[in-house]
Image: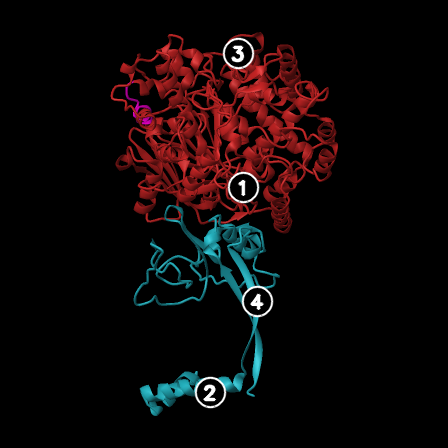
């Protein structure tokens, strides 16, 4: 008997059209938990370093986290893992919504896609009946449109649909997988889905999902609900509104965008507009949002209303969450009305809301600097907003310059040449980042930016306050009910931390303290990603209802796996290390681990070196960021160590084909 | 004064405008009604279902009511504020015309019991957004003998329709067994 998980994986060979239901080994669950953890194991075992993102041997794994589908509030995430066409490393983008629980109710923990379908298809999973169905009539359709059409043709309004739009079909390197109000956007996994010829994965399930210790599990869930209510009534004082409560940043609810619009950069992450947020702008944007927003909405089994239904006049309705609200607006130096209109189109196309606007702003900057010519943009309208709509269409259809831009700023700059590389300035590991440019180095963020293999800062931060309180009394008040800390030393650090003077950044928290803070924050995200818990109720906000002290109980009572804090921390370290090992095998090294050069104005090379050295040491990695043999053995990853020794990874040899550092392009782009 | 007796009526107030469509009510309902309680969950077994269609902004938490063997002669469809709701969209009946409120495996009907034995229905407890709330009120209703007057009225109408003799024959036939 398996609890919380179903014990089955759907293996789909798209080349042959073969579908199998395969039982999994409960031992693997104990070692790697589920979701990201077991995905990493599958990828390590079955996707060697030579395999490209767009090779039939690449796997595209849709996983429901270990506790998805149980009554644990907010546990609803689908973890999609594959090789990213953009970073050429492991991509593990995630989405909330309703898909993962439905998969559990259908009787599966994962769907593993391999091979390539000769024609466009969609997969329909209806409990025990699984079919590969023709999708040629859906070619070119929008992602949301596709979901609606499929539900209609199956006469199954309760089916959950994860679909790609035209961007995924055309293998745009930052194409997303869309699922109603959610999307798995980062790393270009939608392009891999398109390459495999899969338009959508549709699931409907009506089976029971069991938990091991019913009463105990229910009590834990009730405690979490009570704590959420407590936190709703007691926001964190004296911090920005978006940091005070639970959930994802409440972008759909909050009108005041002074902080984002004046602190984040506009255009190609270039221009800070310090006096942007005037009363006039504030009123206009509030009116736009009020008119557009029909309702604040949630994912499966979660009271947080992080998303919204958006209806712009004359455009089909779509759903949105978080910061995509502003990315298009700010990239184009436009207003919210434009941003919401563009996001509608981009959502149907299935595009990442962070990379896409930046790529377009990058193109505009290259044109302005004369690196790209007016002739590269035939038929481009004069008007600013219209230019961006034009560019979006060019990219998604891979027309002309759009074919090159479709590969993101890093690869596009390489192809364009003529100094374009300088303008692809906001990447980590070839992937576009938030448009933030700051003055003083923040050592905690430095480590997260360098070493985060999600390659997306908001997916690593949380738990520890972003800034110190000026007054000791405020700090004392804060630590009083800070039950989430794994160790009281974090309270001591926070109590000492000052905004100015000796105990301030960049030298305080000290190097060792920073390492511990980053390790804790990252660990919580990795646990969430294995369990399928939304970061919005766990690793992302301050003082969340889920933490290192109640998670082991949830796993014991839910999945029936004996668990305590130490065992959970070790499991998280195990698959976190495996993710790194997978990327090391693909060629990632210390040299790849750096923030955008202009992220901070005031840099401290010696301190930064010490930070990275110490953090690697804490993690059990050598000076090049490679997990040591001892670390691997201790975590039960001896098989990784043996492969590293066999292939000479420890001897400084480049990886077999060094996929991550390979500078060739995957798809046939047109040279400018 | 005619005699009356007191009875508690529980009302679940459904504020559809506040529903966020998360389906927590379905999760906890099916979990509570599992055997043993909380051992499993399956929204398809839930006695409350959120009829949701986000793109049309439709969110209606609907509770399982009575079972019927035969479906209605016609169907109804509501349009409110320009939003068109599904056919029979507000009907609580477990009915042969649809699979709602029936066990997915056996097809047996489901009916909301307001979580008998719990201080409040668990769907209400789990609905932190306030779309579901419960109120209780006491009502006074006529005692049994007064209710007999209703019986008389009913019988008279049957007599009028079928004739006294036929009615007595039928009562006799039914009670024989």
Q: Report the residue marked by disc 4.
A: B136
Which quadrant of the view contains residue A523? top right
Q: Is residue A355 depicted above or below A200 in this figure?
A: above
Q: Report the residue marked by disc 3.
A: A647
Figure chain in red: A
Q: Secondary structure at mark 4?
A: strand
Could you tell me if residue A15 is visible in this image? Answer: no
Mark 3 crowdedness (10 Å alpha carbons): few <14, some 14-19, many ≥20: some
Decide: marks 1, 3 in contact (CB < 8 A)? Answer: no
Specify the label residue A75 is tagged with: 1
Name the residue at the bottom extreme. B165
Q: Chain of mark 1?
A: A
First-in-chain label (4 vs 2): 4
Q: Report the residue marked by disc 2.
A: B149
Quick one: A590 or B171, which is closer to the camera? A590
Q: CA distance from mark 3 to mark 4?
A: 72 Å
- Image colour for chain B is cyan
Q: Position of residue A91 (x, y in %)?
A: 47, 25
Q: CA distance from mark 1 to mark 3?
A: 39 Å
User: In the image, which is nearer the foreground, mark 1 or mark 4?
Assistant: 4
Q: Chain of mark 2?
A: B
């Amino acid at each position: 008997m398996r609890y919380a998980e179903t014990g089955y994986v759907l293996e789909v060979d798209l080349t042959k059209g073969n579908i199998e239901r395969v039982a999994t080994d409960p031992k693997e669950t104990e070692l790697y938990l589920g979701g990201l953890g077991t995905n990493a194991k599958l990828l390590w075992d079955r996707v060697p370093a030579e395999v490209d993102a767009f090779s039939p041997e690449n796997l595209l794994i849709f996983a429901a986290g270990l506790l998805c589908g149980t009554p644990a509030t907010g546990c609803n995430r689908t973890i999609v893992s594959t090789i990213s066409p953009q970073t050429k490393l492991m991509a593990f983008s995630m989405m909330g919504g309703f898909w993962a629980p439905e998969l559990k109710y259908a009787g599966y923990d994962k769907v593993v896609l391999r091979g390539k379908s000769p024609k466009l298809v969609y997969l329909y999973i209806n409990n025990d009946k699984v079919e590969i169905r023709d999708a040629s009539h859906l070619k070119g359709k929008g992602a949301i449109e596709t979901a609606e059409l499929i539900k209609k043709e199956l006469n199954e309004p309760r089916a959950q649909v994860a679909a790609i739009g035209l961007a995924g079909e055309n293998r745009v390197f930052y194409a997303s997988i869309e699922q109603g109000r959610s999307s798995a956007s980062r790393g270009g996994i939608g392009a891999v889905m398109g390459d495999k010829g899969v338009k959508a994965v549709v699931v409907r399930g009506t089976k029971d999902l069991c938990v091991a210790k019913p009463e105990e599990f229910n009590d834990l869930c009730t405690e979490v609900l009570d704590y959420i209510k407590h936190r709703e009534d007691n926001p964190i004082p004296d911090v920005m509104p978006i940091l005070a409560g639970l959930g994802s940043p409440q972008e759909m609810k909050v009108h005041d965008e002074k902080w984002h619009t004046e602190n984040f950069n506009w255009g190609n992450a270039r221009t800070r507009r310090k006096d942007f947020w005037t009363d006039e702008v504030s009123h206009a944007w509030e009116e736009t949002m009020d008119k557009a927003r029909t309702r604040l909405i949630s994912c499966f089994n979660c009271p947080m209303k992080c998303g919204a239904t958006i209806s712009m006049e004359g455009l089909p309705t779509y759903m949105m969450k978080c910061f995509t609200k502003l990315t298009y607006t700010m990239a184009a130096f436009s207003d919210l009305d434009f941003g919401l209109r563009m996001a509608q189109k981009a959502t149907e196309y299935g595009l990442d809301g962070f990379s896409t606007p930046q790529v377009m702003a990058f193109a505009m900057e290259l044109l302005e600097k004369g690196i790209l010519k007016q002739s590269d943009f035939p038929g481009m309208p004069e008007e600013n907003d219209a230019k961006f709509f034009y560019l979006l269409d060019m990219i998604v259809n891979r027309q002309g310059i759009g074919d090159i831009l479709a590969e993101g700023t890093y690869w596009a700059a390489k192809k364009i040449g003529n100094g374009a590389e300088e303008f692809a300035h906001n990447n980590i590991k070839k992937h576009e980042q938030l448009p933030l440019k700051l003055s003083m180095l923040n050592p905690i963020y430095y480590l997260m930016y360098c070493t985060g293999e999600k390659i997306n800062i908001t997916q690593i931060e949380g738990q520890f306050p972003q800034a110190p309180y000026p007054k000791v009394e405020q700090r004392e008040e804060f630590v009083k009910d800070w039950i989430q800390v794994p160790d009281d030393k974090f309270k001591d650090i926070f109590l000492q931390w000052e905004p100015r003077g000796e105990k301030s950044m960049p030298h305080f928290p000290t190097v060792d303290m920073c390492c511990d803070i980053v390790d804790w924050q990252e660990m919580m995200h990795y646990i969430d990603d294995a369990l399928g818990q939304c970061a919005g109720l766990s690793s992302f906000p301050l003082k969340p209802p889920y933490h290192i002290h109640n998670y082991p109980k949830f796993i014991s009572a839910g999945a029936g796996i004996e668990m305590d804090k130490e065992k959970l921390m070790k499991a998280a370290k195990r698959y976190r290390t495996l993710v790194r090992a997978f990327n090391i095998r693909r060629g990632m090294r210390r040299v790849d681990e750096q923030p955008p050069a202009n992220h901070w104005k005031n840099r401290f090379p010696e301190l930064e070196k010490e930070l990275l050295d110490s953090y690697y040491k804490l993690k059990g990695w050598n000076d090049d960021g490679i997990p040591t043999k001892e670390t691997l053995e201790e975590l039960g990853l001896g098989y990784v160590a043996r492969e590293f020794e066999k292939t000479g990874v420890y001897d400084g040899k480049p990886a077999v084909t060094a996929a991550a550092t390979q500078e060739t392009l995957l798809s046939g782009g047109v040279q400018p | 004064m005619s005699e009356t007796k007191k009875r508690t009526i529980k009302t679940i107030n459904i504020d559809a405008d506040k529903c966020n469509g998360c389906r927590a009510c379905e999760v906890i309902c099916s979990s509570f009604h599992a055997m043993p309680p909380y051992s499993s969950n399956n929204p398809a077994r839930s006695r409350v279902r959120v009829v949701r269609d986000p793109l049309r902004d439709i969110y209606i938490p609907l509770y399982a009511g009575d079972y019927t063997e035969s479906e209605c002669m016609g169907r109804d469809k509501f349009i409110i504020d320009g939003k068109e709701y599904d056919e029979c969209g507000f009907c609580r009946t477990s009915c042969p015309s649809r699979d709602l409120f029936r066990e997915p495996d056996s097809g047996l009907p489901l009916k909301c019991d307001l979580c008998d034995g719990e201080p409040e229905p668990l769907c209400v407890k789990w609905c932190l957004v306030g779309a579901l709330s419960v109120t209780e009120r006491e009502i006074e209703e006529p005692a049994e003998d007064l209710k007999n007057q209703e019986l008389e009225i009913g019988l008279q109408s049957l007599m009028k329709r079928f004739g006294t003799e036929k009615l007595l024959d039928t009562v006799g036939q039914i009670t024989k067994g």
